[in-house]
Image: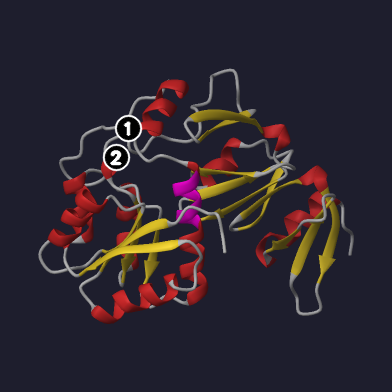
Amino acid sequence: MTDRKPIRVLIVDDEPLARQRVEDLLGAEEAVEIVASVDNGAAAVDAVRSLQPDLVFLDVQMPGKTGIDVVREIGPDDMPATIFVTAYDRYALQAFDLAAVDYLVKPFDDERFEQAFRRARRHVELEEMGELRERLLAVLDQGPRGIGGSGGTGDGAHAPALPAPRTDERYLERIAVEMRGKVRVVPVAQIEYITASGPYVELHTSERAYLIREAIQTLEHRLDPNRFLRIHRSIIVRVDLIDTFHRGAGGDYEVQLKSGVRLRVSRSRREELERRLGVVG
């Protein structure tokens, strides 16, 4: 049993087997209510408006009204958290531009599904999709961006999580994070490591993790390279918190932080890490 509030899910896919697979995988998750399962874009628009789900699994390629058409018709600010499902990876960037939480490329495995669903649940629990973006824009004093694709107009749906650098501030010293109706400023000095998946990163401090929508490569360029190092395509670590460098027998590498957390090191980034740590031989 759990006291967690159920997340209300809408499934949209024109393939019956694809809908059934998502239903089966959701059945293994706690606190999930499937409010509807529909097979076309027009029905999806009606279901979103009438049922107001928390999360939508939305097929990109459907006859007639596509998944992207659905988002454009409803509007990104009025869409629930959305995970696009597609057989074509080339649609991923456009999906993210339309404010998707994540995307799944068919055929996807159970682990990838679980990863996307966990991220979506965090997004639902930590953020309110429309109003909070506008509040964050006001706090950061940023102008809204337009939606990707032809005919888009600026509506604040793509507000950057990071403030623009001042002319006298080369690297970030703080990051604004929107959460539960307010904006919290997280000092960079409190960040121990950063992990990423898709268009989101998690800032890990000693107390908790904060989720923001930002590409890890963008954040990497905004952090002081004397303090932070990217050790994996999806991991940035604060160098002075590294306690131990582990070399595995199979050629895998890890670092252990002073807090005990162990993080993977990719082979392509190992040499730079060893240089920074002064490892010889």
Q: What main secondary structure does the magenta stretch of the protein show?
A: helix
Q: Which residues are magenta?
A: 119-125
Q: Nearer the viewer, mark 1 or mark 2?
A: 2
- Relative horizontal placement of residue 248, taking residue 108 as reference (left or right): right
Image vertical order of residue 9 relative to residue 108, above or below: above
In the image, residue 220 lies in the stretch drawn in magenta: no
Tell me where residue 45 appears, x and y as whole percent: 18, 54
Tell me where residue 62 appears, x and y as whole percent: 18, 68
> Coloured how?
secondary structure
Question: Could you tell me which residue is drawn at 46 percent across and 69 percent down?
Answer: 113
The residue positioned farthest toward the right in the image shown: 280
In the image, residue 122 lies in the stretch drawn in magenta: yes
Query: Which labelled disc corresponds to residue 77?
Result: 2
Image vertical order of residue 58 relative to residue 186, above or below: below
**Residue 171 in sight in this render:** no
Q: Secondary structure at mark 1?
A: loop
Tell me where residue 183 appears, x and y as whole percent: 52, 28
Tell me where residue 207 appears, x and y as whole percent: 72, 41
Give amino acid for label 2: Asp
Q: Which residue is mark 1?
A: 156
Decide: few, some or many residues near mark 2? Use Cα within 10 Å; few <14, some 14-19, many ≥20: many
Question: Could you tell me which residue is drawn at 47 percent across and 31 percent down?
Answer: 181
Q: Secondary structure at mark 2?
A: helix
- Relative horizontal placement of residue 48, taking residue 221 as reference (left or right): left
Q: Quadrant of residue 58?
A: bottom left
Decide: few, some or many residues near mark 1? Use Cα within 10 Å; few <14, some 14-19, many ≥20: many
**Residue 179 in sight in this render:** yes
Q: Are marks 1 and 2 in contact (CB under 8 Å)?
A: yes
Give amino acid for label 1: Gly
- Relative horizontal placement of residue 157, taking residue 174 as reference (left or right): left
